[in-house]
Amino acid sequence: KDSTPGGSGFSFVDMAANKAGIRFASAATRNAQSARNLQLLIASGVTTDYFFPDISGLPEGISQDTFRSEYGGLGGAETRRLLEEIDRRLDSCKGLQ
């Protein structure tokens, strides 16, 4: 929807946030111990980078036409490459492991 006319454009930063949220929810609900560990981690005063990756260089505001032509759409090679890059960045977030 963001990449349609009138939308803000497709955003790999949004995708990073979506993926981080999914990993956070998974860690918070995996079992009672993982939930407790996450609560203790948050209570210790960790910074955002424990749960959210570096987003520098991730493209934003991509029009629908550009998303299709330059990134190949959702299944395109460049989209897959950037999503894999986001996953690598998320793998380095200590609170999401």
Image (cartoon, rainbow, N blue to C red):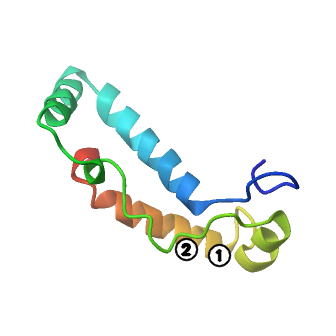
Q: Which mark is residue 33?
A: none
Front-most of residues 6 and 75: 6
Would you say 10 lies left or right of 23 here? right
At a point 82% along the width and 63% down the height, the residue shown is 64
Which residue type carries mark 2?
A: Arg
Is 15 placed left or right of 75 in the picture?
Answer: left
Callout 2: helix, strand or loop? helix
Which residue is found at the position 75% from the left and 51% from the top? Answer: 2
* Residue occupied by mark 2: 81
Mark 1 is surrounded, within 10 Å at the Cα level, by few (under 14), some (14 to 19) or many (20 or more) other residues, namely few
Estimate the x, y position of residue 78 in percent, counting from the top left: 63, 76
Indicate the secondary structure of the residue bearing disc 1: helix
Q: Position of residue 34 (x, y in %)?
A: 21, 30
Residue sitting farthest toward the top: 32
**Mark 2 crowd level (few <14, some 14–19, many ≥20, 10 Å Cα):** few
Quarter residue 73 falls in = bottom right
Q: Which residue is mark 1?
A: 77
Labels 2 and 1 touching (C-beta < 8 A): yes
